[in-house]
Amino acid sequence: MELTDHSRIAVIGGGPAGAFSAYFLLDFAGRIGLQDVAVDIYEHKEFACVGAKGCNHCGGLVSETMLQNLSMEGIVVPSSVIMNSIDSYRPHTQEGDVLIQLPLAQMRIATVYRGGGPQVYDNVGDPPKTSFDDYLLTLACSRGAELIPERVTKLSWQEHRPQVETKNGTIKTYDLLVGAVGVNGGGLRLLEELGFGYVPPKITKAYVGEFFIGREQVNQYIQSAMNVFLLDIPGLKFAALIPKGGYVTLCMQGEIEEALISRFLSHPVVRKCFPPEWKPPRKMCHCSPKCNIGEPRHYFTDRVVLVGDCGVSRLYKDGIGAAYLTARACAATAVFYGISAKDFRKHYLPTCNRLKHDNQLGHFVFDMIALPKKVGFLRTAIRSMAIREQTLHNTKRPMSTFLWNTFTGSATYSRIIFEAAHPRFILRFIWELLKGVLHR
Ligand SMILES: Cc1cc2nc3c(=O)[nH]c(=O)nc-3n(C[C@H](O)[C@H](O)[C@H](O)COP(=O)(O)OP(=O)(O)OC[C@H]3O[C@@H](n4cnc5c(N)ncnc54)[C@H](O)[C@@H]3O)c2cc1C
């Protein structure tokens, strides 16, 4: 079961996973001389639009690993897409904060909007930039993919081939179907109804809020830093404030409900990140999207394969990076090896398994990070170790690197644990702990 000249492929969903799948399918097919392979991308959202209509609800951090991977593919994300370049981060604890410059000058991450920008209320807001998802989709179309701007309403089989039906009644049969529907919206149900045994990943609810405070205030209060919060607020797992032009994006994970969001925003440590007179606006662009936090089951069969969030992703971070990795591996398998379940098991599954095993370590890393939220002397030791590292001229800053990699998705969880297990890291941390205890 292989792709041949004139094969037809449907990609359902035009987010990063769908756009990358289409791009690499056409790129790889061209490399081995397959003629006239047609790739249709089904996507009903208009990524150039502001607000929910164009948005794929996300913090919008693109890790440096991801940016490097793309540039190795010859894809350079243009400055018109990048809202801010992050060159530092600031962990906040009850005891205070510390601005940590990145361990290496070349380590930078970009912030982007997935759609045309936040919904602007009362004419307050910045002009939107080019959206990241729009850029990727245009890139895939420039390779020859066709965008079908419609919602898929039904998936079925026609003589053992996948069939796609859209809202306006168009029905087409394909040789291969790539599911890239993410976890928000009704796409997961369509894949389940296809009846090949797919069980969607475990999901949790998150929160994204866009606060407009103006560029000057962003430069003064947030700077070009990712602000992360190690605060002991019941129900809060993780929170970050990310600068984007004149906006600050708040991303939260935890038991998301209105009370938690207002508890967080009224916390004195968080208040310090905003101008003193600032109040959360009554009307603002915000959402509670779902987030993949567990592995799906049976995510490929003959002629069908799932990528990105509806397949295997990365725990709590770098979902765009995972979409890239799975889409590329899926395209390489389909073009170079074949499109049967056996081919996907042999050549696609290993990439997903690497992500899956790394996520298991990710749970451990996040449990470790949760401890200092509750234990004051651990927080103090982390903070003083990070502060000390800022005064050193060498590039070996283990605590700074540990925190950066944990929160940005720039390294795998296994690398984070490997580096944290280094005797120098452990001894230094014990020393800082002892200093703290003696000081008390
Ligand atoms: C709060 C939050 C913050 C996050 N922050 C970050 C971050 O900072 N950095 C990062 O790398 N990742 C982040 N992520 C994860 C990231 O958003 C996802 O991993 C990434 O979007 C996955 O890409 P995808 O293409 O698989 O899915 P999506 O981006 O969800 O795209 C799926 C697409 O499929 C389309 N679709 C669905 N059903 C249909 C249908 N029936 N017909 C046609 N089209 C359909 C949708 O319209 C959508 O465009 C965050 C996630 C959350 C929830």
Image (tube, grey):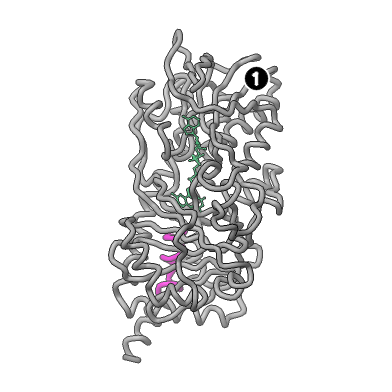
Q: Is residue 373 left or right of residue 37?
A: left
- Indicate yes or no whether the magenta region holds residue 236: no
Q: Which of 428 and 385 is in front in this view?
A: 385
Dot 1 surroundings within 10 Å: few (below 14), some, or many (20 or more)?
some
Residue 1 appearing in the image = no
Q: Is residue 306 visible?
A: yes
Say what secondary structure mark 1 lies in: loop
| Amino acid at pointer 1 | Val
Question: Which one is in front, 78 or 221?
Answer: 221
Residue 71 x, y percent position in the rendering:
68, 48
Q: Mark 1 points at which residue?
A: 37
Residue drawn where x is 40% and y is 75% of the image: 93
In the rendered image, the vertical position of residue 261 relative to residue 295, given as above or below: below
The outermost residue toward the front is: 122
Looking at the image, which is closer to me, 59 or 342?
Answer: 59
Name which residue lies at 45% across and 58% down: 251
Whole-percent x, y for residue 381 in the image: 39, 79
Assess whether residue 421 is covered by the magenta stretch: yes
Tell me: residue 89, above or below residue 293: below
- Give the residues drawn in magenta, as a range: 416-426
Percent position (x, y) of residue 94? 37, 78
